[in-house]
Image (spheres, rainbow, N blue to C red):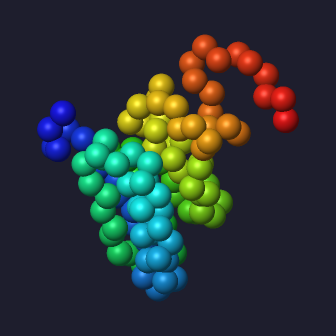
Amino acid sequence: MSKAQLPAIRITYCTQCQWLLRAGWMGQELLSTFGTDLGEVTLVPGTGGIFTISCNEVLVWDRKRDGGFPDAAKLKQLVRDVIDPDRDLGHADRKGHRSKGDTQEDPA
């Protein structure tokens, strides 16, 4: 797959709220998990309390809409659901996402 066809992550963060470190950390988490399966992770400065994360122009998280910030596991699941829904995220999947056809009950 060429780099142009790989998924693009865009994290827009509020500079007034000083959310650059949070945005960078979330970008790092996605790069650590998806590595070369991502074409790019872009940090975009904004204002007015904005914190959004999109993947291939699909809005996967909006701080105002979704009520705060995602934890790393949730963010990875949301991105995975856009780029490769059948991908197993290992420990990040233990609580939450189940692959298609998985009907096993969660013992917890």
Q: Relative to 98, does residue 102 appear above or below in the rendering?
A: above
Which of the 4 image quadrants contains residue 91?
top right
Give how far across and how far down residue 94 sits, in percent.
67, 37
Give how far across and how far down residue 51 sits, in percent.
48, 66
Residue at figure coordinates x 47%, y 67% from the top left: 25
Q: Relative to 71, does residue 13 appear above or below in the rendering?
A: below
Q: Relative to 68, does residue 60 appear above or below in the rendering?
A: above
Tell me, yes or no, if residue 29 can be seen here.
yes
Quarter of the image with the N terminus in it: top left
Tell me, yes or no, if residue 52 can be seen here.
no
Give how far across and how far down residue 33 sits, in percent.
44, 48
Q: Nearer the viewer, residue 18 or 57?
A: 18
Residue at figure coordinates x 14%, y 38% from the top left: 2
Residue at figure coordinates x 44%, y 77% from the top left: 20
Give how far across and how far down residue 79 sits, in percent.
46, 44
Which of the 4 image quadrants contains residue 64?
bottom right
Residue at figure coordinates x 62%, y 38% from the top left: 93
